[in-house]
Image (cartoon, rainbow, N blue to C red):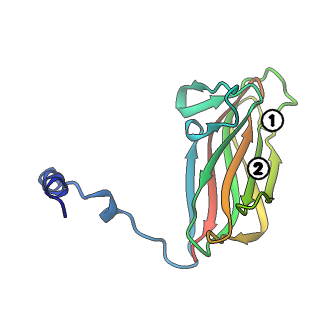
Amino acid sequence: MSRRSAIGLAACAGLGLLPLAATTAAAPAGTSSYMNIAGVAFRAGSHATVLVSHPGNCIATGNAPIHADFFLPQGAVLQGVRAYGHNDGIDPGAGVQIAINAYDGAGQSLMLLDGVTRWPQGYASEPFPITPGVVIDNQTHAYSLLARVPDGQQLCSVRILYVAP
C-alpha cells in the first residue's frame, strides 16, 4: 500500500468512516437487487444532443437519444427496469422510450427490452419487466440502457432489477 493510501485510510478511520471497498457487499445468491441510474448519469447519443437538467437529477433531451452503460454481476438474471420521471402534461400521448441493448463487440446488438412510458401528469414510475429474465454474460456482451425523452417529459432515474447469481 502506498504512503498516500495509508494516510487516506488513517484519515477515514479517524473520522469513523470506512473505505468504500469495505462497505460494499455482494447480495446473497438468489436475492433480488436493484441498480439505480440517475437521469443525469445518461450520456448524449451524439454531439448534437443537448441534455437539460431539472431538479431531482431529472433530464430532458428533446427526443434525442441518450444512453448509460451498466455492469451487473456475471451470471445475474436481468428481470426488468422501472423508469421514474415527470410528465409536464404538454403532450398527453408522449412517453419516454426505454430500451436495453446487449452488444457483442463485433457490430451485432440484441434488444432485450423496448418500452414507452405512459405516465400521468406529474411525477410517476412505470415497470418494464423482462420475462423470462436474461442471464448476464459479461464475457461476450456489454449492456447499455437507452432512452429518448420527448418534449414535456423528464427522465429522473431508471432502476434495474436483477437476481444475484
In the rendered image, which quarter contains the C terminus? bottom right
Residue type, numbered disc 1: Gly
Count numbered badges in the picture.
Answer: 2
Q: Where is residue 115 in the image (x, y as percent from the top left)?
A: 82, 48
Question: On the image, numbered disc 2 is attached to which residue?
Answer: 99
Is 27 rendered above or below residue 38?
below
**Secondary structure under the numbered disc 1 in the rendered image:** loop
The residue at the point 19 percent across, 56 percent down is 5
Q: Left of 57 or right of it: where is 106?
A: right
Residue type, numbered disc 2: Ala
Q: Where is residue 51 in the image (x, y as percent from the top left)?
A: 63, 27
The residue at the point 73 percent across, 69 percent down is 134
User: To which quarter of the image does residue 153 belong?
Assistant: top right
User: To which quarter of the image does residue 1 belong?
Assistant: bottom left
Is 49 rendered above or below residue 28?
above
The residue at the point 58 percent across, 64 percent down is 72
Relative depth, front residue between 136 and 13: 136
Relative depth, front residue between 103 and 119: 103
Distance of mark 1 from mark 2, alpha carbons? 13 Å
Is 51 rendered above or below residue 34?
above
Question: On the image, numbered disc 1 is attached to which residue?
Answer: 95
Label 1 vs label 2, nearer the camera: 2
Relative depth, front residue between 128 and 66: 66
Q: Position of residue 94 (x, y in %)?
A: 84, 31
Q: Position of residue 57 (x, y in %)?
A: 54, 33
